[in-house]
Image (tube, grey):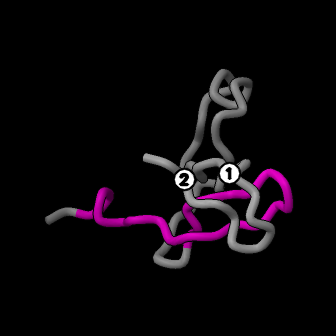
Amino acid sequence: MKKPPCPKCNSELVLDITYGYPSEEAFEDKSFFSGGCCISDDSPAYHCTSCEHDFGKIDLSNFTEQ
């Protein structure tokens, strides 16, 4: 799925924000931005590497029981 451009600067240099505790190896590939260990309804989904703006809304339905 294509990531949306940054709404603040219109850059397409956008990373998915990943929540939890990634391994040291995961940090080396720079393919995501760490959002920390806590996640909530207000947690952003994307991080712009150009202007450092976090945006979007993470879909928590993947993490909740049905």
Q: Which residues are magenta?
A: 43-64
Give how far across and how far down residue 47 sits, in percent: 69, 57
Q: Position of residue 45 (x, y in %)?
A: 55, 62
At horizontal 59% and vertical 36% (from top left) the residue drawn is 22
Mark linked to residue 14: 1
Residue placed most toward the observer, 27 or 53 = 53
Q: Position of residue 14 (x, y in %)?
A: 68, 51
Q: Which residue is depicted at the point 29% across and 65% down?
A: 61
Q: Is residue 14 above or below residue 30?
A: below
Residue nearest the observer in this picture, 33 or 9:
9
Q: Mark 2 is on which residue type?
A: Lys
**Residue at image point 72% right, 32% down:** 30
State whether residue 6 is above or below residue 31: below
Kindly identify the amino acid type of the residue bearing the numbered disc 1.
Val
Check the picture and name the quadrant holding the C terminus: bottom left
Q: Mark 2 = which residue? A: 3
Q: Is residue 60 magenta?
A: yes
In which image quadrant can residue 28 be found? top right
Residue at the bottom extreme? Answer: 42
